[in-house]
Image: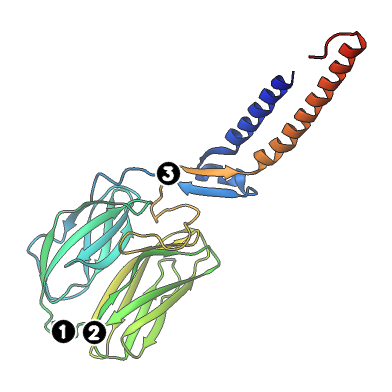
Amino acid sequence: MVKTFIVVAIVAIAGGIVGSLYIYSPARAAQDSGAVGIEGRLPSPPPSQGATISLPRDGQVFTTNPVTVSGICPNELLIKLFKNNVFAGSVICKNGSFSIIIDLFGGQNELVARVYDALDQAGPDSNKVNVSFTDNAKGAASKVTLTSNYAKRGANPKEELIWPIILSGGIGPYAISVDWGDGVTPDLISQQYPGTFNIKHIYDSPGVYNIVIKATDKDGGVAYLQLVGIANGPLSQDNNGTNKGQNAGQDNSGGGSTTPKTKILWQPAALTIPFVISTFWLGKKYELRMLRKKIERGERPF
């Protein structure tokens, strides 16, 4: 009889553990709002399909900035554009297409688009497009440039998003405008010297936003940088494809990922433990009662 109850206890414990593990998805998140546990993403293969740059055409010559780079892409993936292997801007692929505003270096520019999934895994590179830029107003050595260590970054709605931006080249002072993509009047910032400065914003509603930053130096030289802002949770991704900080409530990617997550919920385990203890106690009590009856009947207890 003891063995029977031990088996029952083991089964109950196993059931509690199994019951506390399940596959988590954003659609189920609302049901688990009071849960306390640990979660992580299950590995999945990197994207197998890359983007394709349609415009500009290979061999085009430009004399003014900015330039719009557009093409087709796998839906919901993050697109990072590089010019001469330097990060030039980012956007989320929507409806199978992308469009990024960039500026060009003086001379030759090799443009490549690269896709990233919600796990920051890179897919194949796009076709390479070579274009050239002739800056009649300023030399290449003094051209003002904007870049960032982050292709996407986010914060919860109603919380401040802080984004470090790197400004170089040109001649100060600089006039900086930041269009956060949410219909709010662009921010205007005065920057006296080159270097790193922070832009700040509070999104009112969840969503994925295209941020466009423009810098103009004292002599009229301009630079552009387009980035992805996310308002649904603390999220950032550097330009090596590495997440920094916690993930947003959905990616999204920063990426709109549907990659399942494993969440360990402790409520089922907490309910199982008292059940196991009480079951074992009742089993022992029942066994003692049966032993007494055997002794009273003069039978061997074992």
Sequence-wise, the earlier of marks 2 and 3 is 3
Left or right side of 186 for 159: right
Q: Amino acid at mark 3?
A: Leu
Q: Image point 14% across, 82% down: which residue?
A: 140
Report which residue position mark 2 lands on. 169
Asked if the residue at tag 1 contacts the one at tag 2, i.e. Cβ–Cβ closer than 8 Å, the answer is yes
Q: Choose between 121 and 87: the one closer to the eye.
A: 121
Report which residue position mark 1 lands on. 141
Asked if the residue at tag 1 contacts the one at tag 3, i.e. Cβ–Cβ closer than 8 Å, the answer is no
Please identify, in this view, whether the residue under mark 2 or under mark 3 is nearer the observer: 3
Q: Choose between 46 and 229: the one closer to the eye.
A: 46
Sequence-wise, the earlier of marks 3 and 1 is 3
Left or right side of 192 for 248: right
Helix, strand or loop status at disc 2? loop
Helix, strand or loop status at disc 3? loop
Q: Choose between 231 and 220: the one closer to the eye.
A: 231
x, y percentage for residue 94?
Answer: 33, 52
Report which residue position mark 3 lands on. 42
